[in-house]
Amino acid sequence: GERLDHVMLALLPGRSRAQIQRWIRAGHVRLNGAPTRPGAVLRRGDEIVWEIPPPRPTTLAPEPIPLPILYEDDDLLVIEKPKGLVVHPAPGAPTGTLVHALLAHAGEDFTGIGDEERPGIVHRLDRDTSGLMVVAKTEAAYRALQRQIQERTVERRYLAVVWGNPRFERALVEMPIGRHPRDRRRMAVIPPGSPHPAREARTRLQVLERFGEMAVIEAVLETGRTHQIRVHA
């Protein structure tokens, strides 16, 4: 009764669901001896066979972009990402990203860690969000950090200035988030029972200071959906 990609995610701790789905679509996973799809529903007695393909050669080129590094050892980096810096290549930002800077800092050994297009990246911040990021320098660190985020043994705290004075001091927002039904570039709360797909999302909010029509809040993520804080706020 479970989806194939969900089961493989449990069988392969430290791998991302997107990575597993790419393997399935590329034919590296066979269900009962045949190619399959990520959403295939499993039944008792099914046999799953997979091979982990070697990392594809990256097309990313190092760029000497200054990086504010607060901590570094053999396994990881802690970086203070500035506002305006995109974390990894994406449409509209093919170069000049944090990943390009990391390649210049850490060298070629960095390219095979995790995802080929975002090596070492286990979590991200939006372009206009500043803050601390942890980046893996080894495959073992990458898997361990991913596992800690999935199991929620690490905590992510954000500070935000919001327009409007909240009627609460503390709140837990539990509202599913998905693509906006009419504007696919935006994320939105999707009400339960809606035909539009959404994923569970939970944010803990606390008001730290009030300034008339504005307030400073602390947001603690219990899930990590795109634009979660803004949508829940």
Image: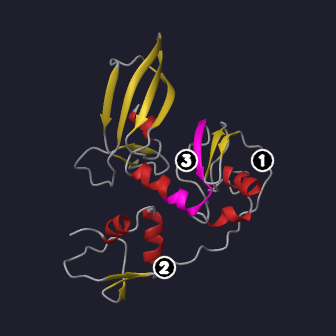
Query: Horizontal placement of 78 versus 105: left or right?
Result: left
The residue at the point 24 percent across, 46 percent down is 192
Cα distance in 3D space between marks 3 and 2:
26 Å
| Residue 87 coordinates in the image, percent (x, y) | 62, 49
What separation in Å lies between label 3 and label 1 (alpha carbons)?
18 Å
* Residue type highlighted by circle 2: Ala
| Residue that mark 3 sits on | 124
Amino acid type shown at disc 1: Ile
The N terminus - image quarter: bottom left
The residue where tag 2 is placed is 26
- The crowd level at tag 1 (other Cα within 10 Å; few <14, some 14-19, many 20+) is some
Which residues fall within the magenta stretch?
Answer: 129-143
Residue beneath disc 1: 65
Alpha carbon distance from label 2 to label 1:
34 Å
Instruction: Determine whether 214 is above or below 115 in the image.
Output: above
Whole-percent x and y of residue 105? 75, 53
x and y, in percent, of residue 96 in the image: 73, 51
